[in-house]
Image (cartoon, rainbow, N blue to C red):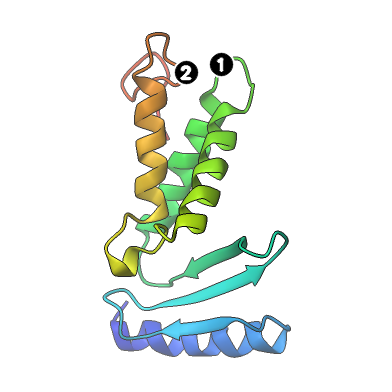
């Protein structure tokens, strides 16, 4: 899909999201991959839920599948993967290091760092791709 077509679709989606009551919606059409960025502020006041939406890059859906697969792989189901990722995201937001636009990693990059950490423990919490577990 061309960048112009993607921007046109995102403009339509932006109008729909605003009509549905989402207030903090921003179209970033000049980015390498045009996106809509949304934020939803919650308590505590420094925490906000952010979401980037694009219509032209299929890698985002694949990245979501990879993260979902790793979360499901935790053998004893103690939810350490999810808890560690959410704690890291809260800390990154609190320190201002969650913004890829200014040179920090994207959220997916941070998640992959957590996955690598959990794979390289003396007793691994997560399997590596190519092990007896097959990846997504």
Q: Which mark is residue 5?
A: none
For the N terminus, the quadrant is bottom left
The residue wearing badge 2 is: 125
The residue wearing badge 1 is: 75
For the C terminus, the quadrant is top left
Residue 111 drawn above or below residue 94? above
Compared across the picture, whether 19 is left or right of 103 comes to right
User: In this figure, what is the number of numbered marks?
Assistant: 2
Q: Position of residue 32 (x, y in %)?
A: 26, 75
Secondary structure state at the residue bearing disc 1: loop
The CA distance from mark 2 to mark 1 is 7 Å
Q: Kindly identify the residue that appears in the image at 41 percent across and 34 percent down.
A: 114
**In contact (CB < 8 Å): disc 2 and disc 1:** yes
Secondary structure state at the residue bearing disc 2: loop
In the image, farthest residue toward the top: 123
Q: Position of residue 24 (x, y in %)?
A: 60, 81
């Amino acid at each position: 899909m061309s960048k112009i077509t993607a921007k046109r679709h995102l403009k339509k989606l932006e109008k729909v999201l605003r009509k549905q009551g989402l207030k903090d919606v921003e179209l970033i059409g000049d980015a390498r991959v045009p996106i809509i960025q949304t934020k939803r502020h919650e308590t505590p006041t420094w925490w906000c839920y952010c979401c980037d939406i694009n219509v032209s890059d299929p890698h985002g859906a694949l990245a979501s599948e990879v993260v979902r697969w790793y979360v499901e792989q935790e053998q004893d189901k103690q939810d350490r993967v999810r808890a560690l990722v959410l704690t890291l995201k809260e800390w990154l937001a609190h320190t201002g290091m969650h913004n890829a636009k200014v040179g920090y990693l994207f959220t997916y990059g941070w998640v992959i760092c957590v996955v690598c950490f959990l794979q390289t423990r003396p007793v691994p919490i997560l399997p590596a791709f190519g092990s007896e577990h097959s990846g997504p």
